[in-house]
């Protein structure tokens, strides 16, 4: 029974040590790094049709099984982050108590035999009747803190500075935990999606990434205006921006012009300028109307679906339908092949008074067999149109961002403590002798040994000078 309990205890201890090992941490960091590379190569959160078109049906099933289409929210990626967090916690827990004990109460008396391993040593006599005030003055001036032991000869002291720099790695550990917590919190409780919002329209919900449905924003968003500029002679976008308004309770509470990398932020939700395009719809069309007997040639700007009375005449015009890429199906029914304005056409109706005169399609690019709408001496043509554009917006909410920023700030603090601050320690033994005292000093520095050697020698020189130098009895 005791033997089995002992074996279970030994097995548990091995598991505990393994979970806190540096080797496990390196393996987990390697897996996370490789996974992140895959996450940058495989588009995240795209429509399944995109993966099928790019990789094929079999690869799509594999991507879905492994969760690679939404890698950073997959269960196994979050599990690796959790295991790494456990590793850092156990590693810190295993080592921190002994370090804390040393920091809180450093050894004041030199351990027997340790002085052989210390490279900086010096021994000299001084005449001071009580050397303690002199030692305190010299070391305090150099930024050292002093602890002492004993009231009579021999007296033991230890002067140290920068000892809390040894906490730097643990601050880095803690910062990584906070960053991982922030990333996990954002993955579990945040969301990301997309919204194509036409000019002049309002929306209160958006499509979640990965085809997971729609989500309400908690407020309405209106696109007041969209503008794109292009490099001269090309259709390559130079700049594009949207003027957006946030509406709550039918009241406009915020307006901002959004550009790439300059989002609108409201209630923790960030709305980024992502893309743009044409909706395939038009706000209005411009028609030419020519009545040859009357020698009238007019231009009419009309909205789709609204009758327009031509001023000064008895004509009225209505655009009943508009197709950006006109085509006919097998049944000779009109449809649009795309939202691109490849073959714009408008279905118009012209009336004189209450009498219909013309009901036909007119084209921006006249066809060989069909150009303008004609009826007798009445000719109608499509001159221009005002296309409605949409702004493509990315909607992002990540509640873990404050934690991530706090973690990085703490990481910088920990790295500065580890790399820029050096722990230095000097042990002093003061032994009373006839006519004065003998001082024995041993010095230790974790880094920058050349600079510490110079400081150590300056301290010894100053102690000798202020203590009325006697011929040295020995040298270190």
Image (cartoon, helix red, strand yellow):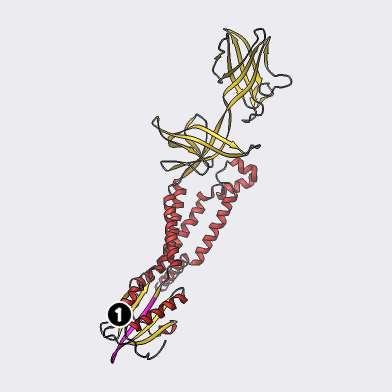
The residue positioned 68% from the left and 21% from the top of the image is: 332
Of 236 and 84, the residue lying toward us: 236
Vertical relation: 328 (above or below) 379: below
Q: Label 1: which residue?
A: 134
The image quarter in which residue 372 lies: top right
Residue 352: quadrant of the picture: top right
Q: Main secondary structure of the magenta part?
A: strand
* Left or right of 275, for residue 187: left
In the image, the segment drawn in magenta is 425-438
Is 170 on the left or on the right of 339, as rendered?
Answer: left
Magenta segment includes 403 = no
Task: Decide if residue 350 is on the left or right side of residue 164.
Answer: right
Q: Badge 1: how crowded within 10 Å, few (<14), some, or many (20+)?
A: some
What is the quadrant of the C terminus in the image? bottom left
Q: Tell me if residue 466 can be seen.
A: yes
Q: Please tell me whether residue 327 is drawn above or below residue 49 in the rendered image.
A: above
Secondary structure category for the residue under label 1: helix
């Amino acid at each position: 029974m005791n033997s089995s309990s002992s074996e279970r205890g030994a097995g548990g201890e091995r598991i505990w040590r393994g979970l806190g090992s540096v080797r496990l941490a390196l393996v987990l960091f390697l897996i996370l790094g490789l996974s992140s590379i895959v996450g940058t190569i495989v588009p995240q959160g795209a429509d399944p049709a995109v993966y099928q078109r790019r990789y094929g049906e079999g690869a799509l099933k594999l991507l879905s099984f492994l969760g690679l289409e939404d890698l950073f929210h997959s269960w196994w990626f979050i599990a690796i982050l959790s295991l790494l967090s456990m590793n850092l916690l156990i590693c810190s827990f295993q080592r921190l108590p002994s370090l804390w004990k040393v920091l809180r109460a450093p050894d004041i008396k030199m351990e027997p035999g340790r002085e052989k391993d210390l490279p900086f040593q010096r021994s000299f006599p001084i005449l001071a009747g009580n050397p303690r005030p002199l030692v305190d003055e010299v070391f305090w001036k150099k930024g050292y803190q002093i602890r002492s032991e004993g009231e009579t000869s021999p007296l033991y002291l230890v002067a140290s500075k920068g000892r809390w720099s040894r906490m730097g790695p643990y601050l880095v550990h803690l910062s990584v935990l906070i960053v991982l917590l922030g990333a996990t919190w954002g993955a579990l409780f945040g969301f990301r999606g997309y919204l194509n919002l036409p000019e002049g329209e309002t929306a209160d919900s958006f499509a979640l990434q990965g085809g997971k449905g729609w989500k309400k924003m908690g407020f309405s968003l209106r696109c007041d205006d969209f503008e794109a500029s292009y490099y001269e002679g090309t259709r390559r976008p130079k700049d594009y921006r949207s003027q957006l308004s946030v509406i709550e309770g039918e009241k406009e509470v915020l307006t901002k012009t959004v550009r790439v990398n300059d989002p609108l932020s409201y209630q923790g939700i960030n709305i980024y300028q992502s893309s743009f395009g044409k909706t395939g719809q038009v706000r209005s069309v411009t028609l030419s109307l020519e009545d040859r007997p009357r020698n009238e040639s007019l231009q009419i700007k009309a909205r789709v679906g609204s009758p327009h009375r031509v001023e000064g005449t008895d004509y009225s015009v209505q655009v009943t339908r508009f197709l950006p890429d006109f085509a006919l199906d097998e049944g000779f029914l009109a449809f649009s092949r795309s939202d691109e304005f490849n073959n714009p056409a408008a279905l118009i109706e012209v009336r004189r008074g209450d009498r219909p005169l013309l009901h036909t399609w007119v084209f921006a690019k006249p066809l060989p067999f069909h150009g303008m709408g004609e009826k007798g001496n009445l000719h109608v043509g499509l001159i221009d149109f005002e296309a409605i554009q949409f702004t493509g917006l990315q909607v992002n909410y990540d509640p873990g961002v404050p934690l991530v920023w706090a973690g990085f700030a703490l990481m910088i603090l920990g790295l500065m403590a580890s790399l820029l601050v050096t722990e230095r320690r000097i042990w002093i033994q003061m032994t009373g002798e006839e006519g004065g005292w003998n001082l024995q000093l041993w010095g230790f520095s974790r880094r920058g040994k050349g600079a510490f050697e110079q400081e150590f020698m300056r301290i010894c020189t100053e102690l000798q000078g202020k203590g009325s130098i006697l011929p040295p009895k020995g040298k270190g």
